[in-house]
Image (cartoon, grey):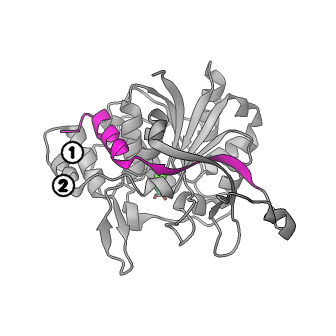
Amino acid sequence: MRTLPVILDVDTGVDDALALLFAATHPAIDVRAVTCVAGNAPLEQVVDNTLRILDAANAPAIPVAAGAVRPLLAAPRVASHVHGADGLGGLTLPPTSRQAADVSAVELMRRTLIDSAEPVTLVALAPQTNLALLVRTHPEVLEKIERIVFMGGSASVGNATAVAEFNVWHDPEAAAIVLGAGVPVFMYGLDVFNQVTVDAAIAETLAVGDSPLGRVVGALLGNRVALSEDRSLVYTGLIGDAGAVCALVAPDALVVERRPVRVELAGYGRGQTVVDRRRYSGEDAIHGGVGDWTVIDVAVDVDAPRFAALFLETLGLSG
Ligand code: BDR
Ligand code: CA
């Protein structure tokens, strides 16, 4: 398999951490840069978490840069109910010796794209604020983007609200800008994100095992929780954002449909990705409500055990 140059945009985040570990370890993925954005935690915390996780991955010196401190228009939000106050669910990692680059996330993305001999895949695992700023500031680099793979959205259920997924809900204007950028887009939404899990027993075994990396992964998986109706936390075991990175190297494990998608910007539906899955969609024109749609690739189903196995095997943790 050829080595794929990627830039990861993250809001680390328990499952962003799992994704970084996987991406930095997989031999077919060449992580050229990591850019950070506020989302699961405030920006400063996201940057620190990202640097510490790259240390834990023993990754070569991948440049990391800080980006947007808040969404384009929306108020800043928090996700501490799911990711903990520190974004990593309280996982204690040694302080990092690395430093973030002295350029912004947008500038690091621009330079990485311009300097690359071949087109680069942008993988967004977070609110798309940094990507939207890149699109608006440096449209000249769009031709160097192979495609944008984003974790976000849904063709069915939401999580931040009944219909909206967190990353898109956090900055819907940014997601709409990115969808309209004219670059090929692949959506790894909740339809597939919610399927790929690791059993609690495996996570517990890893968390107390001999492998330092296994202990980090086990602790992170142990922190994969969701808030139930009575506000108690339940274990989900979701590898989450890491699944979107698995999609880069095992695309045949996914069922993908090419569909028109739009981002809702108002009302209770704000942040929802409406995915038109109708067989015949001609009635829209008759009813007069058309709006801006972009045709993109949407992952609608996944061989979840295969992604979970790929994740653990790549990290050398399949027991
Ligand atoms: C997304 O939001 C965050 O909680 C996760 O890191 C993931 O990127 C899921 O909705
Ligand atoms: Ca994330």
Give the image location of residue 76, x and y in percent: 57, 64
First of labels 2, 1 by sequence position = 2
SS state under label 2: helix
- Residue 278 drawn above or below residue 242: below
Q: Disc 2 beta carbon < 8 A from ligand 1?
A: no
> In this figure, which residue is indicated by the disc labeled 2?
201
Q: Nearer the viewer, mark 2 or mark 1?
A: 2
SS state under label 1: helix
User: Relative to residue 197, is residue 181 drawn left or right?
Assistant: right
- Residue 40 drawn above or below residue 49: below
Viewer-closest of 103 and 194: 194
Q: Give the residue at x 82% y 67%.
A: 289
> In this figure, which residue is indicated by the disc labeled 1?
215
Q: What's drawn in magenta, residue-wise?
A: 293-319
Q: Give the residue at x 64% y 71%.
A: 269
| Separation of marks 2 and 1 at Cα, in angstroms | 13 Å
**Quarter of the picture holding the C terminus:** top left
Viewer-closest of 194 and 97: 194
* Badge 1 amino acid: Arg
